[in-house]
Amino acid sequence: MTEKRVKPVTWNRPNSTIITVTGAPGIGKTTLCKKVIEILQNTKPEVSVGGFITNEIREKGKRTGFVMVDLITDNKEILAHISLKSSVKVGKYGVNLDGIRNLGVKAIVSGILFSDIVIVDEVGPMELRSREFEKSIYQLIDSDKSALLTIHRKSNHPLLKYLRQVYPPVEITFDNRGYVTNSDS
């Protein structure tokens, strides 16, 4: 099978660039975000990165939830978990709206105020159950900050439709994920 090449993306808009990335669950979107951070730290240490990434919570080899990690403070907050009692559910996961507000929204706003680049991993159905989160994404889009957003690939939420239309996503697939997450490229 021939590996598909993804066109390299440069941060070359006059003031900022917004890049969106999508793909199936577990395909490597968070890995890509971590690689971007690593590359920037190694090649452009003067560039500050804010926002958050989302890691899986695994128990006995099974995914049971998600934890958000603030890229500036390294604070963590549960995004969703199968055992979380919440009035808001997405699939089998109870969604922690307070956690989204207390970490996700604050990380985005802090990134806008204090960082050169803002990473948001992910803009999806769980996060978008919070109106404050949705507003913070619009604030980011309206700012002069460069951003890397991982976005849910199937949701019909108006914000996700807008992002897909205005900032067409790079799709990570099994065929190209080695290339897009390889820092030696």
Image (spheres, grey):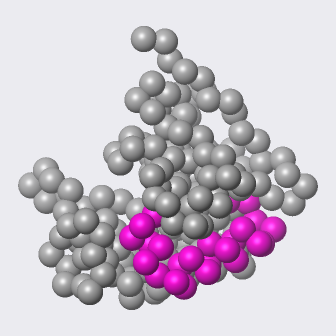
Furthest-right residue in this view: 14
Depicted 2 relative to depicted 19: above or below: above
> Magenta segment: does it hold 127?
yes
Report whether residue 94 is seen. yes
Q: Residue at x 15, y 53 (%)?
A: 62
Quadrant of the frame with the C terminus: top right
Where is residue 113, by image quadrant?
Answer: bottom right
Total numbered badges shown on the rendered structure: 0
Furthest-left residue in this view: 60
Quadrant of the frame with the N terminus: top left
Where is residue 56, by image quadrant?
Answer: bottom left
Report whether residue 121 is seen. no
Query: In the displayed structure, does residue 51 sit left or right of residue 46?
Result: left
> Magenta segment: does it hold 10?
no
Q: Residue at x 13, y 50 (%)?
A: 61
Where is residue 173, by image quadrant?
Answer: top left
Can you give x and y, in whole percent of width and height, for residue 90 in the image? Answer: 30, 69
Q: Residue at x 60, y 23 (%)?
A: 5
Depicted 41 relative to depicted 127: above or below: above
Can you give x and y, in whole percent of width and height, for residue 182 in the image? Answer: 52, 32
Query: In the displayed structure, does residue 145 sit left or right of residue 40?
Result: right
Query: In the displayed structure, does residue 116 sit left or right of residue 158?
Result: right
Can you give x and y, in whole percent of width and height, for residue 3 in the image? Answer: 50, 17
Can you give x and y, in whole percent of width and height, for residue 32 in the image? Answer: 51, 45
Q: Residue at x 54, y 85 (%)?
A: 132
Q: Which residues are magenta?
A: 123-148
